Image: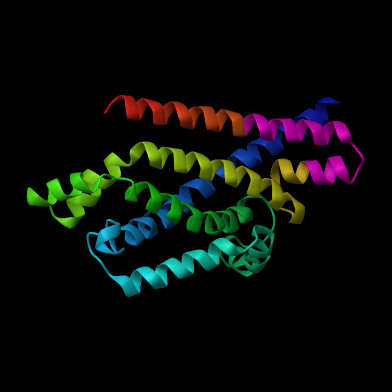
Amino acid sequence: MTAQVWTLIFNSTLQTLAMVLFSTLFSLILGLPVGILLTVTSPEEQGGIIPAPVLNNVLGRIVNVLRSFPFIILMILLFPLSRLLIGTSIGTTATIVPLSIAAAPFVARVIETALKEVDPGVVQAARAMGSTNLQIIGKVLIPEALPSLVSGVTLTIINLIGYSAMAGAIGGGGLGDLAIRYGYQRFRGDIMLVAVIIILVLVEIIQVMGNTISARLIARR
């Protein structure tokens, strides 16, 4: 492969990293409060500290509906929003919008699951000491669930790498776009192979880092 092709591969890798980084950040901003709300409003026997069955049910159904959308379809449906916010519906920057929205419901469920794994006895002890609901959330639930949260975020990042590759099918940029336009459509199997290998390496690096951080957090307890 020529130096021009390697430059193209390098730029596509940077595009994928940018998409994954910013979409992870924005999906956490969107999904974290929803996940916390799903946890605290759940029935008391499920760990809810502010039970609100109606709100919990409605919010849960919205999250489930958004999670059920195939990403390609969701991305097409969000083209108008991308144009409104970014000014275009194609390219790396525009793809961050549907990536963030697609990942947010997943993040919310990951957060909810992690927080519900916290020992109820710890929450009851904090309440007995006079802690407010906000203090229980910020100083008990989140710190206690941190190893699980890290594992959940790791899984989210890996899913976003896969989503970003699929986004390449409709002009999303990055390694997926590289594999389709320069590999598949131009019959360059070597380019496609390199793109796939880079994606696999990225997934492996993220998984190892996530496992390491989570294990260290557990060891510090």
Along the viewing direction, whichever of 117 and 198 lies nearer the viewer: 117
Q: Which residue is depicted at the point 65% across and 29% down?
A: 201
Q: Position of residue 41 (x, y in %)?
A: 29, 64
- Quarter of the rendering occupied by the C terminus: top left
Residue 203 picture quarter: top right
Q: Which residue is depicted at the point 14% across and 47% down?
A: 126
Q: Which residue is depicted at the point 79% across and 41% down?
A: 179
Q: In this view, does 219 lie above or below 94?
A: above
Residue 80 picture quarter: bottom right
Q: In this view, does 4 lie to the left or right of 146?
A: right
Q: Give the range drawn in magenta.
A: 179-202
- Quarter of the rendering occupied by the N terminus: top right
Along the viewing direction, whichever of 65 and 116 lies nearer the viewer: 116
Residue 97 picture quarter: bottom right
Is residue 197 within the magenta segment?
yes
Q: Position of residue 4 (x, y in %)?
A: 82, 30
Q: Is residue 126 above or below residue 74?
A: above
Q: Is residue 162 left or right of residue 169?
A: left
Q: Farthest right residue?
A: 187
Is residue 88 visible to us here? no
Along the viewing direction, whichever of 140 and 17 lies nearer the viewer: 140
Is residue 144 within the magenta segment?
no
Magenta: main secondary structure equals helix
